[in-house]
Amino acid sequence: MIDVVLPCLDEAEALPWVLERMPPGYRPIVVDNGSTDGSDQVAADHGALVVREPRRGFGAACHAGLLAATSEVVCFMDADASLDPGQLPLLTARLGEADLVLGRRVPAAAGAWPAHARLGNAVLARRLRRAAGVRVHDLGPMRACRRSALLALDLADRRFGYPLEMVLRAAAAGWRVTEVDVDYLPRAGRSKVTGTVRGTLRAIKDMRAVLSAHQGQRTTMPA
């Protein structure tokens, strides 16, 4: 069994499609982060393990799901139907030759990835390549790694910087990081991040703070 952490905030519309496409042997853990649309009940009705995380924040939800997971391999992905869980085996199949596998998003339809969000992601990915020396082109939310190793990284961010911090700390720990192309679909409903310029800027701000803190730590390390 492989646990799949799905941070969730008001995704009742998307969850049925996502959970029905979960591959055999993959257990969905839906982390409800304060939904008001009944997402938790929809998730439970579709067989998911539901975890409630009252502290708002993408990282808070991801970490709560990680703590609830019990499988050695754990995956993460959004719950908004922008990613197909049926493609998770593409990532987990690469574990062994890599320690952290990221899903590199490839738009599968017009409008799936708004220009402002795609540009912000590209800028951050370029800075990440320079800062950590990893060949990463997308900070996408679909990823796979080993749970015990991830817990040992002791990630601290509980906002939108969590995915970036994961890659930074993994690279610093000597992990092999790779990417696999996955389809990026038009999400169900309106995104809290890429759906608005304001949401995208908020996520970029969180990630820049994590990146700046990492670079500051590197410059203060003794020679």
Image (cartoon, rainbow, N blue to C red):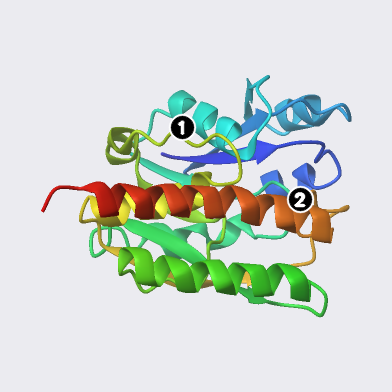
Instruction: Give x and y (percent) for residue 40.
Output: 76, 26
Instruction: Give x and y (percent) for residue 12.
Output: 83, 38
Q: How many residues crowd around disc 2 within 10 Å: few (fewer than 14), some, or many (20 or more)?
A: some
Q: Earlier in the sequence, mark 2 or mark 1?
A: 2
Q: In the structure shown, which secondary structural element does the residue marked by tag 2 occupy?
A: helix
Q: In this view, does 108 lie above or below 200?
A: below
Three-letter code for the amino acid on which mark 1 is drawn? Leu
Q: Which residue lies at the image location 46% right of the left edge and 69% below the top edge?
A: 127
Q: Which of 218 and 140 is in front in this view?
A: 218
Three-letter code for the amino acid on which mark 2 is drawn? Trp
Report whether 154 appears left or right of 126: left
What mark, if any, has residue 17 been given in the picture? 2
Q: Which residue lies at the image location 53% right of the left edge and 62% below the top edge?
A: 139
What mark, if any, has residue 66 been given in the picture? 1
Q: In the structure shown, which secondary structural element does the residue marked by tag 1 occupy?
A: helix
Q: Which of 156 and 2 is in front in this view?
A: 156
Instruction: Give x and y (percent) for residue 135.
Output: 36, 74
Q: How far apart are marks 2 and 1 (CA)?
A: 23 Å
Q: Quadrant of the N terminus?
A: top left
Q: Is residue 160 above or below residue 151?
A: below
Number of marks in the rendered image: 2
| Residue 184 in view here | no
Discs 2, 1 touching: Cβ within 8 Å: no
> Residue 57: which quarter of the image?
top right
Q: Which residue lies at the image location 76% right of the left edge and 43% below the top edge?
A: 15
| Residue 163 in view here | yes
Report whether 187 appears left or right of 107: right
> Residue 117: which quarter of the image?
bottom right
